Image: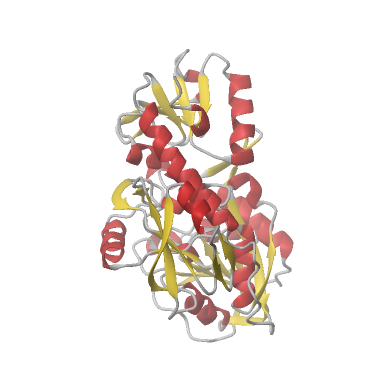
Amino acid sequence: MSEHRHAAGLISIPTAREEGLALIATSPCISCSGVLVNSLEFDTPVTTVTSDCRPWNLPLQLGQCSACGFVQSILDDEWRESSQEIYRSYDSYFQSSSKDQLVFSSGVSESRTQVFVNATLEAIDLPAGARVLDFGCGSGNVLRALSRVRPDLRLDGFDLDTRAESTLRCIPNFESLYSEIPPSSGEYHLVVFSHSLEHLERPALTLHQMTKVLAKGGHVAIALPDCSKDPIKLAVADHCSHFSPQSLTLWLKESGLEARTLPAGTASRECLVVALPSSKIGETPSPSRDLWFFDAAAWLQKAVTQLRNASRQPLTGVFGTSISAAWILAQEPQLARFFVDEDSARNRTFHKRVVYNVDSVPKGHRVLVPFAGEHLTSLLDRLRGFRPDVIWSGLHEIGRT
């Protein structure tokens, strides 16, 4: 068996092709620059979804740098035009009337942002009156959560879209909204990237710029999707980069930041880390760094095939009203007859289809649960225990006769 070797480890090309995947050298890496990215080509096209939960007519194009191992979308002209179109009509919380997404663990719900903020504040010691900057602050969920727990903090936000400024100014101790990166002031004790880093075309450069605004001993806190546990997040059309907790920690180390993973991300299938500048730069990537990427991409490829077979089955609903559910709709619009959600704050329709609470799903209907791994297993166990009269199925179970 021939193999493709690079500095980030060993990739088995024949194994990738067995899953309907192939690697083709394409564009420069968005992290290390100047090095060709190996594009992962799918035999069966995979349709994308936007990060604000809309099916999107852009074929998925993923790649991995042959030198540094950085997993990324292929940022060609078509991708940039598509992203601009997405952001022109972007709505972060359209499905919950600007309320934050909930995370369910063993049936108990918590605000996803509050989980991240609480874990961050437990991991670092912020002094009284510390200054915090939220990069990509949107309508202020992170700033609001910080203010709720630590009303002494001085809060600033950065966002290219300033439409939410009046909302932000209602947050206690909010001071300034920037639409340009603040000067290298060394004033901030904490800079937060909550689901913003993955949207950046030059993530390493932006991260480097933001570390310059940190006070001595200041930290960076990052939350972004864990694509190793949630493969559908690889198919978000406006995400530039894709991580597992391990690959994020290694990438931060190569970028001059010493990072710690926060275990609170397990329930929400997120990478949650806190990091601070380090003098150790340029560490050699781990040989195992790329393995999750091929597993996740192969899962997507197989899922598309199974969804096409499942579209012939009657009475099918989809669990959730967020990115994963919208991705199912993007692949097979006729498959999703209705949606199911545990979050009572969500709207009662999703893409013009009814949304049931778990306890109101009609008896005997089939509901697809579009997740993977341990999260899928625990969720299926809980749903089947609560509603045994509903056919709850993972993607690996659908499309069977």
Name the spot of residue 150 as percent of width and height, x first: 65, 61
Query: Could you tell me which quadrant the C terminus lies in?
Result: top left
Q: Count the marks.
A: 0
Name the foreground residue: 68 vs 248.
68
Please give the name of the residue rendered at 32% of the width and 52% of the height, measured from the top-left corner: 59
Dividing the picture into quadrants, the one containing residue 325 is top left
Tell me: 317 left or right of 396: left
Left or right: 172 in relation to 399: right
Residue 200, picture quadrant? bottom left
State the residue at coordinates (44%, 15%): 362
Please say whether residue 331 is visible from this viewpoint: yes
Residue 107: tell me if it is visible: no
Q: In this view, does 219 lie above or below 290?
A: below
State the image quarter where residue 243 is shown.
bottom right
Nearest the eye: 234 or 344 = 234
Name the side, left or right, on which 79 lies relative to 150.
Answer: left
Q: Is residue 279 above or below residue 302?
A: below
